[in-house]
Amino acid sequence: MNRDDALALLRRYVASENLVRHCLATAAVMKQIGAYLGEDAERWEIIGILHDIDYEEVGEDMERHGDVGCKILLEEGVDEEIAQIVRRHNHVRYGPVYERPVEIALQAADSVSGLVIACALVKGGTVSDVSAKTVKKKFKEKSFAAGCDRSRIAAIEPLMDAATLYELAIAGIAGIKEELDLR
Ligand SMILES: [Fe+2]
């Protein structure tokens, strides 16, 4: 499975363009973190693309989020490891503490992607105007992009410092800015 395959699969289950963009942004950050850690960056990117595949299917029922995604992925022939990572990324059910780097990264990428995009939107959608310093400042401002869970971002700590995460997240999102409708 490559990026195009994963995106095509996601689009079969997700109609919302906003949700697709969230998954692409999370994936772009996952790819950067994976590469930084010397892991399989393309695989981490695919995990990011697929992580919320069940979001529309479960609707408001967050108890089923992840479990349903895992089931969909197994039915679609995606490998067991990816399916289980998607299942367990529901931190309310399976977190908040994760041991595996890929799972820690997914928690952080899922939240920091939204924070970086919110920082870009404040700057007229120009992601190149966002610096790690901007993100650090907005991280502390709890009312800013309040839906971005700061504790999931801070949990990256065993793998890298926050500034490094911000740099990687900005680079990842800048790399796919057209797909995210940013500049
Ligand atoms: Fe997500």
Image (tube, rainbow, N blue to C red):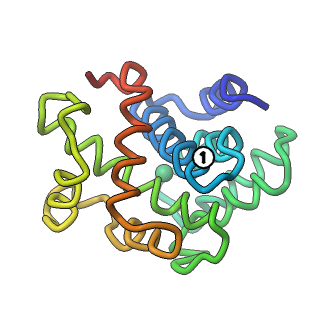
At a point 43% along the width and 40% down the height, the residue shown is: 22
Residue 172 visible somewhere in the drawing: yes
Q: Amino acid at mark 1?
A: Ala
Direction from residue 1 to residue 43 in the image, left or right: left
Q: Position of residue 101 (x, y in %)?
A: 63, 66
66 in relation to 177, above or below: below
Q: Position of residue 124 (x, y in %)?
A: 13, 28
Where's the C terminus, which quadrant?
top left
Residue 119 image-quadrant placement: top left
Identify the residue under disc 1: 35
Element class at badge 1: helix
167 in relation to 125, above or below: below
At a point 38% along the width and 71% down the height, the residue shown is: 154
Residue 57 visible somewhere in the drawing: no
- Binning the other alpha carbons within 10 Å of mark 1 as few (below 14), some (14 to 19) or many (20 upward) gives some
At a point 55% along the width and 33% down the height, the residue shown is: 14
At a point 42% along the width and 22% down the height, the residue shown is: 179
Direction from residue 57 to residue 144 in the image, left or right: left
